[in-house]
């Protein structure tokens, strides 16, 4: 029921709506792209379910961590502001140096963060989001820009291995889904 | 009048109307309930559809996939009732929509935070928030066609039709019932009118019959006068001759002739009375055997010496109910007819037997009167019972004899037939129904003054009340012959005065119609009040007076013979104190 082609224009309009004005250092193209990615990161929290064991408490916020270089700037904070997922508030954390990922539920892997991720070891209970613009390595969700539009691949096997459940509605929107 | 009758009589059948009302109210309630149920159902279905759209579109909305959102929205078109569908984002901006012609979709929707279902302007509007994992992503909105009035009307058309039919049926029933009631009333009125007419006609016919009879009697007055003149002639000449002769044998024959003439006169008047039906019928339970035996003497006198009288009546004959006087007269008439039919002599037979009845015919007694006379020719056989039919010369017959026989038989609940062959005699058969009533005790037999005591206390002194000197004389002599003393009073008041002064009377014989301001009946009542056990015998020659007396007091019709008086006195004396 879907076609892979998505006009960038549409995404741009939606982005304009959702992300609001941007104050980031990047150019107009980057600005749009990372605005969309920021919103997507927030949305992922709603379409992914974590295992009960991964919970750090009933009210513990959903930790949205950016490791490595942060391409979003305030756009991510704006997208996450006031948002909740599964009844929990969203908290954006930026981990510049090597640090434990204990309070992270969603980990965006920025440029130069691969060693950090490797050090963190077991990814169990964490959604690892990678970006083609930052590295070639693929996490459970991997951002790409296809035909001028922000899209993503999903590695369902890795996600399941980490104990995560990804909504079929999200799977439907992925460019590709890696199943077991 | 009960409520039910009131209801039945009211022109407007309340019951029908209330049934109709109940039907209407029930129909209305059913409609309202079903309308509500249908709307609820509609809202539920629309809500479910909107929910479906909201959940399906969440991904597309979350990640800005407008085409996917449009696909989901278009899928809703399948439902023809959906007028418009739209998906709005978190900020109520339109993302995808479809609209049927004539429907507009606002680019920015009115914010709605909660699921909303509302009917407005004949439209059903359903709004469902699109949420995923607790994140508000936007809204899915559907606009559906609420049932147009026509469709709704169609839905209830059948109900309305049934109701209308019911109303029609009730109406028709009501009208029919009213019409039926009116028709019934009219019918009843007509029946009443018919009954009235019949009664009037019966009265008129009765009056006509009576007047015809009277007219006929009037026409025959001449003949009767002739008869009477003859009788008077015989009587007066007989008396004259009696005064001139001393020969006992001759005197006996003369007095016999006079007596016969008087008897014929009496029979004639009785017949006329019976025919004009003015004589009171006094039916009583009769033992025919005893009754006829009692008549033997009189019958022998009516026949001639050359005619033998045979009476053949079994002892176990059932009793019948009839007027004894009428029976006597009928037998007398038949005897006289037989005598006339046997100029050469012959036999006159009176026989009787029981006729056992069946399921249809009740028990009866058959009385046959046979002569060996000339018989009746076939041509006249059917006419002999007609009044005034006679083959006898003027002065010899009036044609009333068999008419009386016929009247007697019919008024006694029986019938009479005639069988005859010219030259071979005639048989009259009178059939009278058997009565279950007990016959009266047998009258005391034999005659003689001394026997009078058998009925109770002895009768010795009679108070005779009679205005006519002649009658008083002759009755007085009769009383003397019966061995009784009497005191005569000329009027009722005089009689009362006499009784007051000296109440030592054993019996009172009083005429009914008298001058002096008080008639015999009133006198009898007054005397009866003073002395309830005093026997009173009333006598009269007037049938009207006889009818007035009824059965209150014993009655003796004038003219009467010594035997009649004797018999009547016995009966009255025997009934005393009873
Ligand atoms: N026993 C009989 N034998 C032959 N004819 C009879 C006999 N009885 C009656 N009739 C005929 O029937 C007629 C009618 O009889 P009914 O007794 O009615 O009248 P009536 O004898 O002529 O007159 P009334 O009896 O009045 O003196 C008679 O005139 C006679 O012709
Ligand atoms: Mg006769």
Image (cartoon, coloured by chain):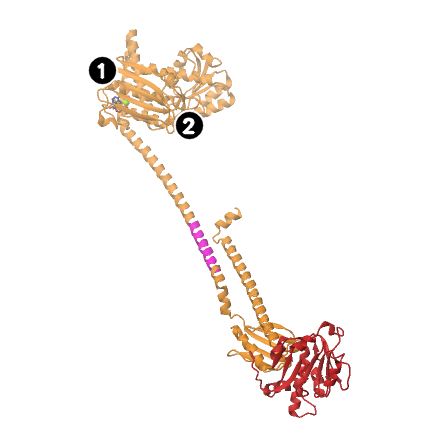
Residue B152 magenta-highlighted: no
Q: Which residue is mark 2?
A: B548
Point 57% across, 66% down: residue = B41
Q: Nearer the viewer, residue B227 or B124?
A: B124
Circle 1 sits in a helix, a strand or a loop, which is it?
loop
**A54 above or below A137?**
above
- Provide residue B478's location: percent of width, then percent of height: 39, 14
Distance between the alpha carbons at the discs numbered 2 and 1: 46 Å
Q: Is residue A159 visible?
A: yes
Q: Nearer the viewer, residue B35 or B527?
A: B35
Neighbourhood count class around disc 2 (C-alpha, 10 Å): few under 14, some 14–19, many 20 upward: few
**B284 above or below B164?**
above
Q: Which residue is mark 1?
A: B344
Residue B169 magenta-highlighted: yes
Q: Nearer the viewer, residue B130 or A88?
A: A88
- Chain name for mark 1: B
- Chain B on-screen colour: orange
Query: What secondary structure do most residues of the magenta stretch adopt?
Result: helix
The quadrant where ligand 1 appears is: top left
- Provide residue B379's location: percent of width, then percent of height: 22, 27
- Chain A on-screen colour: red
């Amino acid at each position: 029921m879907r076609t892979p082609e998505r006009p960038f224009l549409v995404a741009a309009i939606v982005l304009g709506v959702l992300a609001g004005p941007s104050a980031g250092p990047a150019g107009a193209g980057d600005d749009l792209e990372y605005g969309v990615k920021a919103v997507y990161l927030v949305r992922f929290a709603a379409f992914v379910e974590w295992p009960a064991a991964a919970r750090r408490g009933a009210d513990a916020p959903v930790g949205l961590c950016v490791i490595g270089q942060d391409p979003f700037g305030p756009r991510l904070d704006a997208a996450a502001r006031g948002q909740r997922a599964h009844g929990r508030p969203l908290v954006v954390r930026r981990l510049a140096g090597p640090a434990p990922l204990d309070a992270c539920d969603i980990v965006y892997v920025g440029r130069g963060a691969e060693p950090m991720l490797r050090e963190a070891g077991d990814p169990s209970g964490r959604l690892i989001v990678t970006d083609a613009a930052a590295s070639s390595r693929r996490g459970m969700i991997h951002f790409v820009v296809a035909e001028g539009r922000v899209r993503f691949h999903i590695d369902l096997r890795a996600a399941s291995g980490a104990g995560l459940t990804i909504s079929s509605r999200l799977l439907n929107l992925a460019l590709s889904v890696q199943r077991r | 009048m009960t409520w039910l009758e009131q209801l039945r009589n009211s022109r407007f059948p309340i019951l029908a109307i209330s049934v109709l009302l109940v039907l209407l109210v029930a129909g209305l309630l059913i409609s309202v309930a079903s309308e509500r149920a249908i709307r609820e159902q509609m809202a539920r279905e629309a809500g479910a559809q909107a929910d479906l759209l909201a959940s399906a579109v969440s991904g597309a909305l979350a990640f800005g996939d407008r085409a996917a959102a449009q696909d989901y929205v278009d899928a809703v078109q399948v439902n023809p009732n959906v007028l418009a569908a739209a998906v709005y984002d978190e900020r109520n901006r339109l993302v995808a929509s479809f609209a049927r012609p004539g429907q507009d979709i606002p680019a920015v929707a009115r914010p709605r935070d909660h699921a909303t279902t509302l009917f407005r302007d004949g439209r059903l509007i359903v709004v469902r928030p699109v949420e995923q994992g607790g994140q508000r992503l936007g809204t899915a909105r559907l606009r559906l066609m609420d049932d147009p009035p026509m469709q709704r009307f169609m839905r209830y058309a059948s109900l309305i039709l049934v109701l209308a039919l019911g109303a029609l049926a009730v109406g028709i029933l009501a009208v029919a019932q009213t019409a039926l009631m009116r028709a019934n009333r009219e019918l009843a009125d007509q029946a009443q009118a018919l009954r009235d007419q019949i009664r009037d006609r019966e009265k008129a016919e009765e009056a006509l019959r009576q007047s015809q009879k009277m007219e006929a009697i009037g026409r025959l007055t001449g003949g009767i006068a002739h008869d009477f003149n003859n009788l008077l002639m015989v009587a007066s000449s007989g008396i004259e001759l009696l005064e001139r002769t001393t020969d006992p044998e001759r005197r006996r024959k003369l007095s016999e002739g006079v007596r016969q003439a008087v008897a014929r006169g009496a029979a004639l008047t009785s017949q006329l009375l019976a025919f004009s039906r003015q004589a009171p019928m006094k039916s009583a339970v009769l033992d025919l055997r005893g009754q006829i035996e009692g008549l033997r003497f009189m019958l022998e006198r009516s026949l001639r010496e050359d005619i033998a009288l045979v009476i053949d009546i079994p002892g176990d004959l059932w009793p019948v109910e009839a007027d004894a006087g009428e029976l006597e007269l009928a037998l007398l008439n038949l005897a006289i007819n037989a005598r006339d039919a046997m100029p050469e002599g012959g036999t006159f037979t009176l026989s009787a037997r029981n006729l056992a009845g069946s399921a249809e015919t009740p028990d009866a007694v058959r009385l046959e009167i046979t002569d060996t006379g000339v018989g009746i020719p076939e041509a006249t056989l059917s006419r002999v019972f007609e009044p005034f039919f006679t083959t006898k010369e003027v002065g010899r017959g009036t044609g009333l004899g068999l008419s009386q026989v016929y009247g007697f038989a019919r008024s006694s609940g029986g019938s009479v037939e005639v069988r005859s062959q010219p030259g071979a005699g005639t048989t009259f058969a009178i059939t009278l129904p058997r009565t279950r009533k007990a016959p009266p005790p047998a009258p005391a037999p034999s005659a003689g003054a001394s026997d009078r005591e058998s009925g109770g206390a002895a009768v010795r002194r009679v108070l005779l009340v009679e205005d006519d000197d002649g009658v008083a004389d002759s009755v007085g002599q009769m009383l003397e012959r019966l061995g009784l003393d009497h005191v005569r009073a000329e009027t009722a008041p005089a009689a009362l005065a006499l009784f007051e002064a000296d109440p030592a009377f054993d019996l009172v014989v009083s005429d009914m119609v008298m001058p002096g301001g008080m008639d015999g009946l009133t006198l009898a009542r007054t005397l009866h009040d003073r002395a309830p056990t005093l026997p009173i015998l009333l006598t009269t020659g007037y049938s009207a007076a006889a009818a007035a007396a009824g059965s209150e007091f014993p009655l003796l019709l004038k003219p009467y013979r010594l035997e009649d008086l004797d018999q009547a006195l016995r009966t009255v004396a025997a009934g005393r104190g009873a």
